[in-house]
Amino acid sequence: MNFKRGSAALASVGTIIGLFAAGAARAQEVVGAPYSWQIGFGPSFTPVMERVNWLHDVLNVTIGVITLFVLGLLVYVMVRFRASRNPTPTTLTHNTVLEIAWTVIPILILVFIAVPSFRLLYYGDKAVDAAFTVKVTGHQWYWTYEYPDHGNFKVESRMLTEADRVKQKPNHPRMMAVDEEMVVPKDAVIRVVGTAADSMHGWTVPGFGLKKTVIPGRLNEGWIQVAKEGFYFGQCSQICGNAHAYMPIAVRVVSKAEFDAWVERKKRSAGLMPPLETDVASVVPPISR
């Protein structure tokens, strides 16, 4: 009997070591993080952010055309109506066609901008056929992530100190590495609902195109669908107190199999599932006979 127990224990230890070795061999890369000399938007990692980038480009072109048109008008007026060319000012005071034009054209431009803007707002507001929901709660000054569709276990996410970051997660950006990330599977539509426990916070991940102000007593909704595995980072975007700069947002995107294994571990540690025999054996030593 003791020999069998010893063999089972060795097999379990070997399996655990193998899993850790496999994890270390294919450590996930940091994908969504700020980079040096960044000016515009970073890469898009969700369908919402792709549409945000598209609208941003359209608006930049629209603004550029308007600016060039106004500049051309100013140059024309300065040349055509300068004092040396027009020593006697005209007595014209009204031009009906011109007044209608400069009223109607800006309205049409605003409508041209409003239609895709509203479509984008509605597109990013509600998740369609979401796989599950993650509830985000902002605290002073950390985040919690609850998984109501998986037993409602909770994960607390706090920023690592610089010494701990260097030891545990040296490839993560400074002041953005956390002890526990929000974990989601790739390619799945995830509904994200946010609230706050004390003051207003802002759950913002630029690469996801998601920026939700979380407010006590209220739920705000958004969604993400990330195609690439890895780590993605953001920060609180509401000035929520003296430690506002120290509550980063970290999301880890994994495969479906890895996500299911992570959920099982969290549910067991939260007491939502019975512990494994190996876990019981490690806590309660066998009775010697």
Image: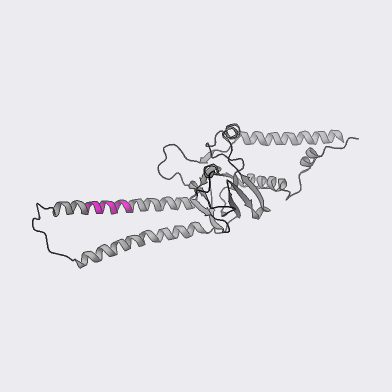
- Which residue is located at x 51 percent, y 41 percent? 31
Query: Could you tell me what secondary structure mostly forms the magenta stretch?
Result: helix
The picture places residue 121, in percent across and down from the top left corner, at 46, 58
Q: Name the colour scheme.
A: one colour
Q: In which quadrant will I find the N terminus?
A: top right
Residue in front for this viewpoint, 199 or 251: 199
Numbered label tally: 0
Q: Given the current orientation, which residue lies at the most extreme front position?
A: 242
**In which quadrant of the rendered image does the C terminus lie?**
top right
Q: Is residue 214 above or below residue 12?
A: below
Residue shown at 21%/66% (left/top)? 97
In the image: residue 48, left or right of residue 132? left
Tell me if residue 162 comes above or below residue 86 in the rendering.
Answer: above
Q: Position of residue 270 (x, y in %)?
A: 71, 48
Q: Nearer the viewer, residue 251 or 260?
A: 251
Give the answer, above or below, for where 256 lies relative to 92. above
Q: Which residue reaches farthest bottom?
A: 96
Q: Position of residue 277 (x, y in %)?
A: 79, 42
- In this rendered view, identify the residue nearer to me: 179 or 285: 179
Q: Is residue 91 magenta?
A: no
The image quadrant that residue 255 belongs to is top right
Q: Looking at the image, is 170 positioned above or below residue 53?
A: above
Give the image quarter of residue 168: top right
Q: Is residue 63 left or right of residue 223?
A: left
* Residue range of the region highlighted in magenta in the rendering: 62-72
The answer to whether residue 161 shows anywhere in this view is yes
Residue at 44 percent of width and 60 percent of height: 119
> Can the viewer see residue 45 in this picture?
no
Residue 101 placement (x, y as % from top left): 25, 64
Q: Is residue 198 left or right of residue 93?
A: right
